[in-house]
Amino acid sequence: MNQADTLIVHAAELATMAGPDQPRRGRAMADAAVIKDGAVAIKDGRVAAVGPTDDVARTWTATETIDARGRLVTPGLVDAHTHLIFAGTREDEFEKRLQGVPYMEIARAGGGILSTVDKVRRATQDELVALAAPRLASMLAHGTTTADIKSGYGLSTADEVKSLKAISALQGHVRLVPTFLGAHEVPREFAGRRPEYVDLVVNEMIPAVKGLARFCDVFCEQGVFTPAEARLILTGARGAGMGIKLHADEFAPSGAAELAGELQAVSADHLMAVSDAGIKALAASATIAVMLPGTSFFLGGARYAPARKLIAEGIPLALGTDCNPGSCMTWNLQIVMTIACTQLRLTPAEALCAATVNSAHAVGEPDAGVLAVGKRGDVVIWEAPNLRSLPYCFGVNQAWRVITSA
């Protein structure tokens, strides 16, 4: 008999997400590669065997055997877009939006991103770590085992470095992918001098965060950074060895999706207002479209990204919470999967694909999000009898047991 560390047996459904080692597109997103009465053996943090329980249990034993009878088993969830490093909250803005004040109007009045920047600048690295740690623990408890975490609330070289070092200090049971977002907004001290701030991002911040961040992201949006400015920043980041991403077309068509496709960005995120030209550019590229439907829901907007159109064009979709204190205060990817089903019209299998294998590729972690031999042994056992039940039952934590390779 082969000896594993953990053996999970008799899963009612084992959604392995097994398939080609690439993002899933079109109809492939609906294939969760489900095994009935499935089993997974994990050894040294990696999947050692996967298949029907009778086959796996015949050749594997383990230090710990878990009976998952009556439960769904999936790969650990992967959150493709978060802003988990922040200080302070903005529930006052939440109430203003309920009274009809638009998000962008709140930002122009001194709220929004810059209000969080003020708080992050006053916080120490240790304080940022202490604030984020409980959020991260809750994220793990809800089944997320890998996550993108962006900086972007510092907007000075020292504070962006501080934020990225805080992310590094938080590495643990959730595998964190640090993303530099110095181009999240123009800070107050550079008001009216945006070209100077872009120059600072390119020539001072990017060299300073090299080695701390795996990706560089830019908020390319009307009133924030233009496609030309985003191109300059992302070209500099790519030259420094970082992968590139964009916050694209969240509030209005800006040309950001077209730029993402042209530059072959790893992902283009938001896309609620993406144009037909932007969709064509993404379809002609390898860029993954990261859907953040929790943000539309939290902002009370009627506009969601055109997910079905993107899928029809062969664009791979991923999911993220967009966890942040202003426009989506949740780190629970389970409920985002439900919103993706009800508002983006994804099927449960497509939502799971977007929250596992496709999100793993969107954050540069292709060993995550799949239960196949040699892949990372991140597993969630759900208090749900089948895949359809995962987004169907919402507002409660269905994660019964979370196993990580970290």
Image (cartoon, rainbow, N blue to C red):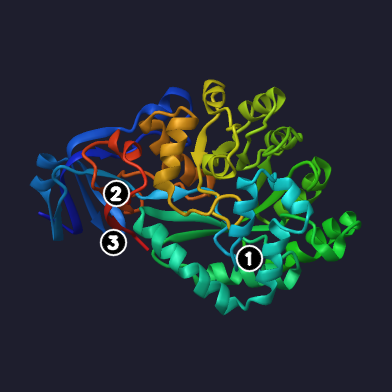
Identify the amino acid type marked 3. Asp
Residue 128: quarter of image? bottom right
- The mark closer to the camera, 1 or 2, is 2
Question: According to the image, label 2 marks what residue?
Answer: 398
Q: Which mark is residue 239?
A: none
Q: Is residue 30 above or below residue 117?
A: above
Check whether the beta carbons of the residues at disc 1 and disc 3 lie within 8 A of each other: no
- For marks 3 and 2, the one nearer the N-term is 3
Residue occupying image coordinates x 66% and y 70% = 120
Residue 214 pos. (x, y %)? 60, 57
Question: According to the image, label 3 marks what residue?
Answer: 44
Instruction: Find the distance from the CA under tag 1 to the CA under tag 3.
Output: 27 Å
User: Would residue 55 appear left or right of 118 to someone viewing this image?
Assistant: left
User: Would residue 35 appear left or right of 80 to someone viewing this image?
Assistant: left
Identify the amino acid type marked 1. Gly
400 or 23, which lies in front?
Answer: 400
Residue occupying image coordinates x 20% and y 58% = 6
406 or 343, which lies in front?
Answer: 343
Identify the amino acid type marked 2. Gln
Question: According to the image, label 1 marks what residue?
Answer: 211
**Quarter occupied by the C terminus:** bottom left
Residue 18 pos. (x, y %)? 34, 37
Residue 33 pos. (x, y %)? 30, 32
Residue occupying image coordinates x 73% and y 61% = 114
User: Would residue 306 appear left or right of 348 to someone viewing this image?
Assistant: right
**Quarter occupied by the N terminus:** bottom left
Check whether the beta carbons of the residues at disc 1 and disc 2 lie within 8 A of each other: no
Q: Residue furthest top?
A: 312
